[in-house]
């Protein structure tokens, strides 16, 4: 009798295959710790320059920076404010990502694609697959959750307390702005950080754990359930980058996760508030999501055709 597709030998094979990911095999460099120090210093310089430039543009345009300290007040026009909130968040994150990516390109003397999808070209198929798989799993689990605990208020895009035109605008802009935000976070963590840590150590478990923990820590959320949930996502998306050879799947999955929240759970300014005391039982849903997405990544990785390396 043949063994199941995801039996233990297959998992060992997956681990061995991940150790030969292009992120690891193309990450070696001389003086890695010195380069890391240079990366941090140059990134800070670029970020300061970028913040000053952005501040000048905002001041000249008269743009009012939204209050990021808490949820926006409820009103029929609240979702217009949520669009502004997401726009500022996306711009800030992309500014950070571009600064770090450019600094990494200079310090490590590598082109941008070597961090984003090393050794191959951009794959829109992986981006759509990440979005579709994460969306399908999340919608199913949200439906299960609602059977046991009804939502305290209607989904933002369905809430009649908000004007219809603001809901339509919010739904559309959320796709664009949250895509930019997801791409920015994936550039920092599943592109630059993953490549840099792979140049410091060959221990795959340490690379994945470091990426997951730092990804969660950067959100500055003291709630332990939220910390573990984000770390699980960080681990899964790191594994996807290693197994599929690029950040596209992680970007799509990240977008689906954030879009589900913004459309169907709560407006982004509320969802982004740290310290919300999430019940630990919700980690069950996170674990199920992680297992389902990891299984999908493995299936895709084993069916992936060999691509011509540059």
Image: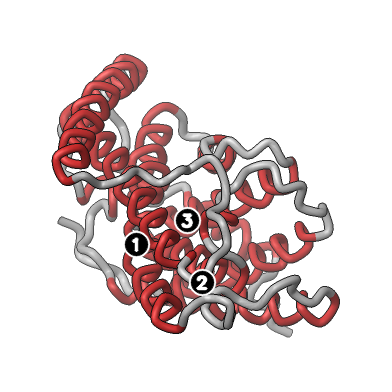
Are circles 3 and 2 on residues that touch, CB within 8 Å?
Answer: no
Q: Residue at x 56, y 56 (%)?
A: 73
Location of mark 1 (residue): 177
Q: Is residue 152 left or right of residue 105?
A: right
Query: Which of marks 2 and 1 precedes in the sequence?
Result: 2
Q: Is residue 225 left or right of residue 215?
A: right
Location of mark 3 (residue): 17
Percent x, y of residue 70? 57, 45
Crowding at dot 3, Cα within 10 Å, few <14 / some 14-19 / many 20+, comes out as some
Name above or below for residue 176 compared with residue 137.
above
Front in this rendered view, residue 63 or 276: 63
**Quarter assignment of residue 294:** bottom right
Quarter of the image for the N terminus: give it.
Answer: bottom right
| Front disc: 3 or 2 | 2
The span from disc 3 to disc 2 (Cα, nearest Å) is: 52 Å
Quarter of the image for the C terminus: give it.
Answer: bottom left
Location of mark 2 (residue): 76
Front in this rendered view, residue 132 or 110: 132
Q: Is residue 236 left or right of residue 44?
A: right
Crowding at dot 1, Cα within 10 Å, few <14 / some 14-19 / many 20+, comes out as many
Determine the secondary structure under disc 3: helix
């Amino acid at each position: 009798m043949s063994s199941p597709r995801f039996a233990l030998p297959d998992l060992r094979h997956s681990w061995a295959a991940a150790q030969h990911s292009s992120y690891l095999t193309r990450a070696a460099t001389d003086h890695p710790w010195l380069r890391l120090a240079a990366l941090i210093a140059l990134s800070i310089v670029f970020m300061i320059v970028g913040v000053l430039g952005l501040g000048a543009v905002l001041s000249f345009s008269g743009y009012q920076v939204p209050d990021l300290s808490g949820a926006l007040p409820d009103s029929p026009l609240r979702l217009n404010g949520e669009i502004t909130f997401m726009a500022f968040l996306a711009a800030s994150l992309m500014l950070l990502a571009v600064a770090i990516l450019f600094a990494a390109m200079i310090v490590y003397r590598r082109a941008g694609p070597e961090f984003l999808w090393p050794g191959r070209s951009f794959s829109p198929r992986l981006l759509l697959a990440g979005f579709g798989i994460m969306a399908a799993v999340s919608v199913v689990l949200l439906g299960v959750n609602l059977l046991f605990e009804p939502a305290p208020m209607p989904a933002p895009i369905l809430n009649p307390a908000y004007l219809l035109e603001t809901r339509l605008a919010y739904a559309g802009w959320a796709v664009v702005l949250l895509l930019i935000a997801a791409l920015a976070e994936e550039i920092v963590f599943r592109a630059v950080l993953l490549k840099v840590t792979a140049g410091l150590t060959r221990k795959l478990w340490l690379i994945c754990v470091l990426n997951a923990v730092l990804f969660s820590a950067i959100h500055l959320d003291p709630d332990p359930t939220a910390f573990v949930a984000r770390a699980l996502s960080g681990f899964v998306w790191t594994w996807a980058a290693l197994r599929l050879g690029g950040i596209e799947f992680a970007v799509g999955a990240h977008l689906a996760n954030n879009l589900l929240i913004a459309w169907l759970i709560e407006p982004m300014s509320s969802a982004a508030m740290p310290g919300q005391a999430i019940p630990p039982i919700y980690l069950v849903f996170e674990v199920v999501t992680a297992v389902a997405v990891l299984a999908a990544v493995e299936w895709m990785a084993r069916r992936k055709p060999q691509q011509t390396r540059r």
